[in-house]
Amino acid sequence: MKQNKLHNIKKTGFKVPKDYFDTLEDALLSDIKLKEASNDSGFKLPEGYFDTLEDKVMEKVSTKPPVKVVPLFRKRSIIYISGIAAAALLLFNLSIFKSKPTFDSLDFETVENYILNENIGSYEIATLLPEEDLLEENFIEYKVEEESVKTYILDNLDIEDLIIE
């Protein structure tokens, strides 16, 4: 915008409605009279209303007969039901229904991993076996085939274990 012509402007650009200042005084006086009239709400209380209000309310409230309250659940029935529920929970949580594991149901890999990871020695394993299985005759008469020894060595031992120094 060119600012060199601003000092030559004679009109401000604002306009007032026609006859605005002729009716301004009347509009202001009517607003003042309206505000004075609106302070009075138009509602009036009878004399002594709040003095007798409490007595009237108490009279209406106290004339009603007391209502008998019948409980939905009696105390005795709640005790019986909770006792039955507790007995049922104990029955299901006790080990009555649980069966003990047998050696036949155990997985071979599970037992092997347990023995390897728990650092169980040969003496602890020997205490678990019956004496009949530990007889010397069982170990002497056991015949090992050469083929099974070779496959065991190839499957379970490393080459470094086989090299004799």
Image (spheres, helix red, strand yellow):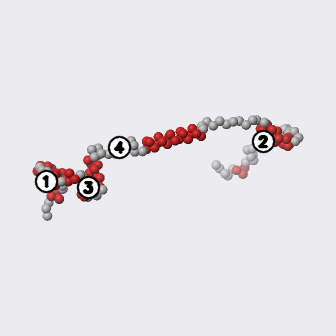
- Whichever of callouts 1 and 4 sits on the residue coming sooner in the sequence is 4
Q: Amino acid at mark 3?
A: Thr
In space, the residues marked 2 and 4 are separated at their CA atoms by 102 Å
Closer to the camera in the image, 160 or 115: 115
In space, the residues marked 4 and 3 are separated at their CA atoms by 24 Å
Q: Is residue 78 above or below residue 131?
A: above
- Whichever of callouts 4 and 3 sits on the residue coming sooner in the sequence is 4
Label 4: which residue?
99
Instruction: Name the element at disc 2.
Output: loop
Left or right placement of residue 123 versus residue 27 in this view: left
Nearer the camera: disc 1 or disc 2: 1
Disc number for residue 127? 3
In space, the residues marked 1 and 4 are separated at their CA atoms by 38 Å
Nearer the camera: disc 3 or disc 2: 3
Nearer the camera: disc 2 or disc 4: 4
> What residue is rendered at 35% in x and 43% in y?
99
Contact between marks 1 and 4 (CB within 8 A): the answer is: no
